[in-house]
Image: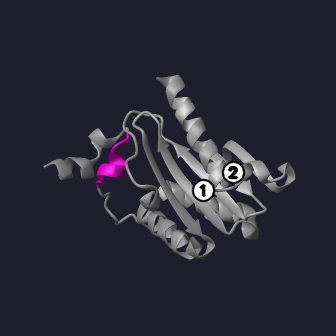
Amino acid sequence: EQVRSLDLTRQFVNAQLISYLDWPNVSVDRRAEMHEQKLASSFGYRGKMDRFYISFESEKAFIADLKMGRQGILAEAADNYQLAAYAEIAWHTYKDRIKEIRVALSAPRTGEISVHDYKYEDLPSIKAKIQKVIDDVEDPFCPPRFSDIACAKCALVDRCPAAKKDVL
C-alpha cells in the first residue's frame, strides 16, 4: 500500500509539473525545487511544504501538501488555511518573482485530490484571512471554537472544553 501511495503521489506531482509549469522545457537555472523545506512567512511563523516548485520563466509555482493518512482530505484546497499560508510564504520569500500559485492536496490512500489556483491579486485577502486566525488565537477573551475539520486530528480534542460542549 505504501509503494502504491508513493507511486500515485509521484504521478500526480509529475503531471502538475508538466501541465502547469511546463517543467521539462524550463532550463534548470530558471526553476527551483524544494522538498520538506522550511520557510518563513511575513507574519513570523514558519511552514514546511511537502513539495514546492517554481518556474521563474512563467512566474508560476506549485505547492503540494501530501496527506498520507487514512482520513484523506478534510477540507478542499480553496478552503485550506495551511495552503493559503504556504502561498503567502511563497510570495513573501520570492517577492515579485511569482504571479500565480497552484496549491494542491493529495491523499493517495483515498484517491482524493483537490487543487486551487491563487493569483498575486489574492495576496491581500490571504493575509487578512491569516491575520484573523492569529488575532482569534491571541485574543484571551475569545473562547475556543469546535470544528469538525480543524479538531479532527488534534491530540487534545478529548480534553478540549469546546469539543465537549459541542458533543452535548
Is label 1 in a helix, a strand or a loop? loop
Q: Is residue 24 visible?
A: yes
The residue carrying pointer 1 sits among few (fewer than 14), some (14 to 19) or many (20 or more) residues within 10 Å by Cα, namely: few
**Could you tell me the amino acid type at mark 1?**
Tyr
- Most extreme residue toward the left is 168
Question: Is residue 24 in the magenta section?
Answer: no
Coloring applied to the structure? one colour
Determine whether 117 is above or below 3 in the image.
below
On screen, residue 86 versus residue 139, left or right, reads right
Question: Is residue 149 in the magenta section?
Answer: yes
Which image quarter: residue 139?
bottom left
Determine whether 99 is above or below 40 in the image.
below
Which of the two marks, 1 or 2, is nearer to us in this view? 2
Residue 22 position within the rendered picture, expressed as x and y whole percent measured from the top left: 71, 54
Residue 60 position within the rendered picture, expressed as x and y whole percent measured from the top left: 68, 62
Work out how far the residue at label 1 is from the one at label 2, CA to CA, in angstroms.
21 Å
Q: Residue at x 53, y 52 (%)?
A: 104
Q: Which mark is residue 45?
A: 1
Residue 110 position within the rendered picture, expressed as x and y whole percent measured from the top left: 39, 36
On screen, residue 17 versus residue 122, left or right, reads right
Q: Residue at x 47, y 69 (%)?
A: 129
Q: Residue at x 54, y 63 (%)?
A: 117
Highlighted magenta segment, given as a residue range: 146-154
**Could you tell me the amino acid type at mark 2?**
Tyr
Q: Is residue 47 visible?
A: no
To which residue does mark 2 refer?
A: 53
Is 113 in front, or is 142?
A: 113
On screen, residue 36 versus residue 109, left or right, reads right
